[in-house]
Structures are given as C-alpha cells and as structure tokens.
Amino acid sequence: MLDGMSMDQLRTFIAAADEGSFSAAGRKLRRAQSVVSTTLANLEAQVGFALFERTGRYPQLTEAGRALLEMARAAAHSMDEFKAKARSLAEGLEPELAVAVDVMFPIANLTCAVRAFHEAFPSTPLRLYVEALGAVLQPLLDGNCRVAVIGSLPEIPPGCASEYLLSVAAVTVVAPTHPLAALQGMVLRSVAAEHIQLVLTDRSSLTAGRDFGVLSTRVWRLADLGAKHAFLRAGLGWGHMPRHMVEDDLRSGALVPIHLELFPSSGPGFSMHAIHLADNPPGRAGRWFIDKLKQG
C-alpha cells in the first residue's frame, strides 16, 4: 500500500496541516474540499493510521501526523529540487543571461566576473540591473532576470533559493568638516540622531514603510549611491558606505570614519547572496557566473 503513495498526497497533507482546515487547503490547492478530504483519507488508509483528529471544528494533527509532517516537507522539497535541476539540465545554455546586482557589490569583482563571462560565453548577451534593496529583487520576481545578487536587503523572499557569495565590509563616514567628525571615541546613537543621515531609498515597493540601518530622525533619501557618496563628501550628512567605495577617501582624508554606538567596530556590513526562484534555477551560463562571483 505504501508504494502507491503519491507526491500529490503529501502536498495535500502539508497544505492541510499549514492551513488548519481542509477547506482552506482546498482553496490553496484550487481543489474542492471533498477532493482534499478524499485524498487525505486515502493517504491515511495507506499509512495505516489517522493523520488528523476530526472531532473538533477544525482538524488537528495527531501525534503520528506531526511525526510525519516534516518528513513530508523534506520529500516535497527534494522533489521540487529534482524537477528544478531537471529543468535546468534540459534547458542547457541560456540565450541571454539577465542578472540584478546590488549596488553594494564590489564593482571590481563584478567587472572581473563580467569580463571572464564574455570570454567564456561570447555569444551569450549579458543584461545587468544595478539596484538597491527591494529593487534588486523586483526584476527577479517579475521574471525579467534569472539571478539576483542581494546584500542591502537582509531578507530572502519565500519561494527563493539562496547561495552565499561573499561579505562586503562597510563603514560609517562623514566629511572632516561635519560636526560628528570632531567627536572623540564612540558616537552615541542619540547624538547621531540629531544630524541628517543619508540613506538609499528603494525604487520598488517591496520595502514600503520599512527602514534598514536608519538611526536618525532626520533622513535624506537618495536613489543613487553615487549621489550619496557625493553628498557625504560635501558634508551634507552622515551615512553607511561599502568600504571599497570610500577607501580612497579615507586615505586622503576626504571622508573620516565615525564609530556609532550601534556599530562600535567597523560599521554595518553586507552579506552578499545569489538568489533565484526555487523552481527556476539558473542554466549553465548563470551557474558559471554565480561561481565566478564567489571567487571575489
């Protein structure tokens, strides 16, 4: 009997457990409640025991059901990975590779990877989106790119697979003429909050109403990292920057580091990840490009 168990039954089991009712599971799976009930009854007949208690208003997992739920999830996840890998192998080399890259990613590393990509895949066009925060994700979620490299947005959306690439050091800086530059030692958060903080704004709506790394009550929002850099050098505010972008300024004294109460060591950093839709992994060219970005 167990050999006849299907992946459809396991997905129905998972949906019923997650949604808390057979009717809600039916809506999620776009099936009638009767079909869900029948599918689960058949599964229970095959395993030889009840997976749900049906005595109350809503079905509750039995102890045996709880014991099998995580294994069902693992089996469904493995099947998803199998199908995704098969789809990737069947597709072969992409006709074009579109990648969204976080503006915080080191440009020297990106340039090196792009140059090597051109040499390895001379007939495959490469299309790059360079954005920040949710705008890095938007082209991926909209189906306009295959891979997104994120770092300034510290979240991986549901339905995406993530792969660590590298870490980017960051530093909090001001111009030497800025009042915060004259302070010795650690700058209290309450003191920093009295001054204008320059932050990147999200071109997408994915992070609407949310802030990342914002400490000040006085904020100027900029959509371009180059503009933020120029404003920092002009003494118009303080802000976090990827260290590789301001290294020359720190050496020349055009910018100076400050040590905030919240980030007493080296400032906030960015952990860069390559992500893709779990059911649509990159093909051969995309896989090669991700591996190249890892090499730094």
Image (spheres, rainbow, N blue to C red):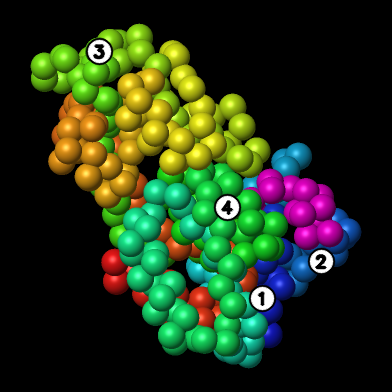
Disc with the residue nearer the chain's start (2 vs 4): 2
Residue on which disc 1 sits: 7
Residue on which disc 3 sits: 179
Disc with the residue nearer the chain's start (3 vs 1): 1
- The residue lying toward the viewer, choosing from 41 and 101, is 101
What amino acid does circle 4 point to?
A: Leu
26 inside magenta stretch: yes
Residue, x 44% and y 41% (percent of image)? Answer: 226
Which residues, given as a range, are shown in magenta?
Answer: 17-30
Label 2 vs label 1, nearer the camera: 1
Label 2 vs label 3, nearer the camera: 3
What is the secondary structure assignment of the residue under circle 2? helix
Quarter of the image where one finds residue 5: bottom right
What is the secondary structure assignment of the residue under circle 4? helix
Residue on which disc 4 sits: 137
Question: Residue 292, image x and y in percent?
Answer: 37, 74
| Label annotation for residue 184 | none
Label 3 vs label 4, nearer the camera: 3
Disc with the residue nearer the chain's start (2 vs 1): 1
Q: Is residue 161 visible?
A: yes
